[in-house]
Image (tube, grey):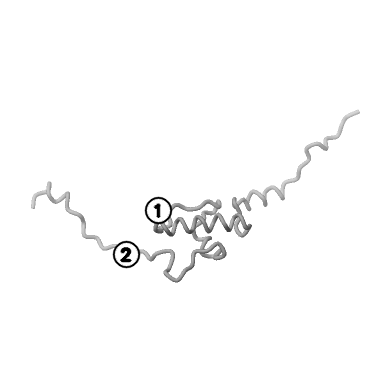
Amino acid sequence: MDKSKRLFLKSKRSFRRRLPPIQPGDRIDYRNISLINRFISEQGKILSRRVNRLTLKQQRLITIAIKQARILSLLPFINNEKEYKRRESTTRTTGFRNKKK
């Protein structure tokens, strides 16, 4: 076989099939926080379907469950713990300047 035809052949690499993130027994529900947390980024954003490796139907159900959990205050809308900790440690002195007489 010449080189020009060899370039178009697919390599026969073996690949390891990844396990689906949602098992058949898992129930997608707003109360199942441990399941929902797997599909949220550190910033609190819903991860895309490509990143999650979910089917279209599963992604829709996850999105609805996350939104319901946020409305019911089971999940935060934005994960800003770092900013909150930083704000607590700083002291604010604006507005308390000593006036010279």
The outermost residue toward the left is: 1
Give the farthest residue toward the right: 101
Residue 99 point in image, percent of width and height: 87, 31
| Residue 97 or residue 25, whichever sits in front | 25
Q: Which residue is mark 1?
A: 50
| 56 left or right, relative to 5 | right
What residue is rendered at 43% in x and 59% in y?
A: 58
Residue 12 left/right relative to 99: left
- Decide: few, some or many residues near mark 2? Use Cα within 10 Å; few <14, some 14-19, many ≥20: few
Mark 2 or 1: in front is 1
Q: Secondary structure at mark 1?
A: helix
Q: Establish if 98 lies above or below 80.
A: above
Distance between the alpha carbons at the discs numbered 2 and 1? 18 Å
x and y percentages locating residue 78 in the rendered image: 59, 50
**x, y percent for residue 47:** 47, 53
Q: What's under tag 2, amino acid-wise?
A: Arg
Residue type of the residue flagged with mark 1: Arg
Judge from the rendering whether residue 57 lies leftward or rightward of residue 69; answer left or right.
left
User: How many labels were placed on the picture?
Assistant: 2
Q: Which residue is mark 2?
A: 16
Quarter of the figure that contains the C terminus: top right
Q: Residue at x 50, y 55 (%)?
A: 63
Q: Residue at x 17, y 50 (%)?
A: 8
